Image (spheres, rainbow, N blue to C red):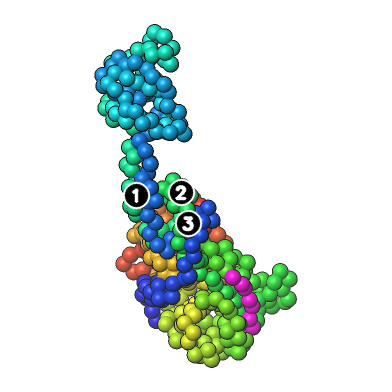
Amino acid sequence: MTSWREARRIAEQLGRETPTRVLTVPVGRAAGLVLAADVRCGRPLPPFDNSAMDGWAVAGDGPWRVGEPVLAGSIPPALPLVPGEARPVATGAPVPPGTLTVLRTEDAVVEGAAADEGADLLDVHGSWIPGRDIRRAGEEADQGEVLLTAGSVLTPPALGLVSAAGVRHVDVSSPPLVTFVAIGDELAGAEPAPGQLIDSLTPMMPSVLAGLGGRCATTARSLDRPAEVAAAIRRARTETVVTSGGTAHGPADPVREALDRLGARILIDGMDLRPGGSLLLARLDDDRHVLSLPGNPLAALVALLVVGWPLLQGRLGRAAPELAPCAAPTGFAADDRERAVACALVDGVPVAVPYQRSGMLRGIASASHLALVGKAQAELLRLPWACD
């Protein structure tokens, strides 16, 4: 049986061996995608010296004679300011060459005639700081400088950054496509017959996989028959297939025989973690991956978070999600086994939520983290859908 830490490592490495396709897309369509290549600054950022505040661009010591204003969006002035000269500037407006500082509107006063008639400008506070409130060309980034590295997620601020830097297209990793197959004679839709259960995993799988970096291309259901399971996996047109159910060693569990029929090489056969330990990770002879989860809903989610998440992130060229050391969750009776415990943070301390049995979803539905608790330490994994 594989330790859960080793299972994470194997899954991430397997994902890196089968990277996703690289797409070149407009920046406006790249939100939430993962960069497949570094992004370099297309032009200096900012492209010219400009004012950070409304006020006056000045040169030399005051009092200053006021010239024509410089507005945002205007062509950068070619003539430099001379000592004793000032020009009103708006926020974002280019400052003339020779500008020593920008005096803020609230820090100065115009005396005498109107400013556009050349009145004297006086600093009401009697002092000023050279270079203040001037955004220098290239101070945020020089042309050609790396702004974002491969593996970075294009968040809204990242999209704004690359757009401001003159980047119009980016190379991104296509989200890994996943086929999900729910296995079990007992599974049914919204109207189960006596002895059947409503399939709870299929409805949640598209959103769960999206949170892990993948995209659920299609879902299917299979009875507990090795031939049928093998056929469902064979029909999948995605490089990653995730199944649920049938992973134990009982006489009605079909996954191992199905994988054997497909000539699969099993890389992980069981993981030392409860719930979620009854999983398999296999590679088919066409290099596709099959991640077989337990059938119980909480166990399936744990296995998907611990192993499936690193697999999909590896395919995107990213590291497995970070784990943070933590104290053992309160409200949880530890034993000698490695345990996955759904938790909520209370004043920064993980507290086990109720309803933790492997067939339940009520507990993890109210949780924000998963604590992986061992004999010597505990580590905390933030759930991808957590919003606290």
Q: Residues within 10 Å of mark 3 (few under 14, many from 20)?
A: some
**Residue type, numbered disc 1:** Gln
> Is tag 3's residue or tag 2's residue first in the polypeptide sequence?
2
CA distance separating discs 1 and 2: 13 Å
CA distance separating discs 1 and 3: 16 Å
Residue 154 vs residue 195, the one in the foreground: 154
Name the residue carrying label 3.
169
Q: Where is residue 167 in the image (x, y as percent from the top left)?
A: 44, 52
Q: Which residue is drawn at 37% across and 44% down?
A: 45
Q: What secondary structure is the stretch in magenta mostly built from?
A: strand
Q: How crowded is mark 1: few (under 14 residues within 10 Å), some or many (20 or more)?
A: some
Residues in magenta?
Answer: 217-224
Up/down of 243 relative to 302, above or below: below
Q: Which residue is drawn at 45% across and 86% down?
A: 265
Find out whether residue 223 is within the magenta segment.
yes
Q: Position of residue 378 (x, y in %)?
A: 36, 63
Dot 3 lies on which element?
Answer: strand
Q: Quadrant of residue 341?
A: bottom left
Name the residue carrying label 2.
163
